[in-house]
Image: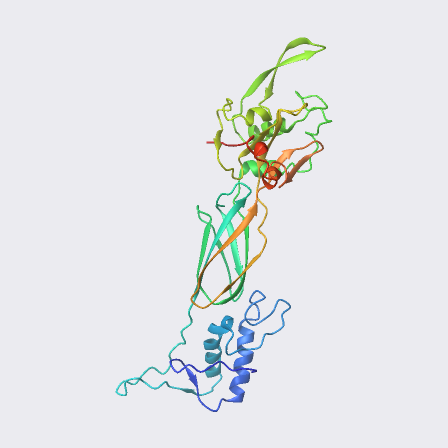
Amino acid sequence: MSVHPPVNTDCLRASRPLDSKGIAAADLAIYAAHEKDPRPNALFDAAGKKKPLSATDPAQECLRDEWMQHYAGAGSKVEQPKPKNGKAPGAAKQPCPCSKATLTVTVRYEPVDAPVKTASVTITGPITKTLTTDATGLAKFADLPSGSYTITSKYVGRHALVDQARSYIGNTDWATDKERPPLPRNTRKCDQFVYEITTGAGYAVPQKPHDRKKFGISFGTVMLPSNAGDWADAASAIITFSSVPAPEPGDIVAYSNPHYTDATGHVGIHTYPKDSKPDSVTLAPGADVGAKQIIRRQTVSAADLSVVENDKIFWHYYDEGAAEETARIIFRRRP
């Protein structure tokens, strides 16, 4: 053993001189006990190389008492601490105090800030642990050994509408150059895609009459799905959906643009967000630390060539700070 754990007069103590065989046995035992722990951790780096045992490394604070137990378990003698009261026998063994830390992780969406419910948060370090966020986007980890931790988060909720929409990613049936009755070729079909997916999932979505014309002559009316402009109009009569300030997976996201010549805007379905990027935090003994994780929104929609899922459509306006554009985006949820 390169450095033996320090002796604490209030804790279990090794008798002097230290037993070399007991040291070797305790070294082997403690590394073996943690060999399968996720790495990096207090005893192994990411490549699996052993870190030396240290008398001062805070990440190994709890390991020092564990090492002492292995030392005693190998048959090495342990001194009984002297009682403060000479008339009291004192305990033969007293566990070393190990001040545990607390880590509270908050998971938020970007853009359009809101808490992420049902996100799985995993911390990896001296120990590995996973919790699911509550309705406020919080996951609180208590009784943690000190040391360095990596934090990652991912959305783990499920929504039938999202699963159905995502099953068509890459599909070209709603492409601009395809005919998909009642819509002809060379028409954008994002509204038709949303209508078919939502009604296919059992949602009631009204259609509206549309005047059919050719060469300026009316040929009657045809019932068509609500278009992107309808979805993006908070006052429109899509009575089976209500407007909400921030979307969640399964909600409809719509954008209107009066400058488009071939469409009223764009409409899609808020799908599952991207996983977070890893963050790192170091916990001192007894610390109470807060950390924030960000996961990015995505949508599924029918683009010109195929059905796509990404974090750019709709959301890039927020990245660019385009207030005029974001003011036209409406989020709708089925009550």
Residue 307 figure quarter: top right
Identify which residue, 154 or 263, lies in the foreground.
Answer: 263
Question: What residue occupies the far right of the structure in this picture?
Answer: 177
Residue 313, horizontal then vertical, whole percent: 63, 37
Residue found at x 46% / y 79%: 69
Identify which residue, 180 or 133, lies in the foreground.
Answer: 133
Question: What residue occupies the far bottom of the structure in this picture?
Answer: 17
Count of numbered badges drawn on the protein:
0
Residue 306, horizontal then vertical, whole percent: 69, 34
Residue found at x 48% / y 30%: 243
Query: Coloured how?
Result: rainbow
Residue found at x 56% / y 24%: 230
Residue 124, horizontal then vertical, whole percent: 54, 61
Residue found at x 40% / y 74%: 97
Question: Is residue 38 depicted above or below 11 in this figure?
Answer: above
Quarter of the N terminus within the rendering: bottom right
Identify which residue, 126 or 243, lies in the foreground.
Answer: 243
Question: Is residue 312 depicted above or below 283 in this figure?
Answer: above
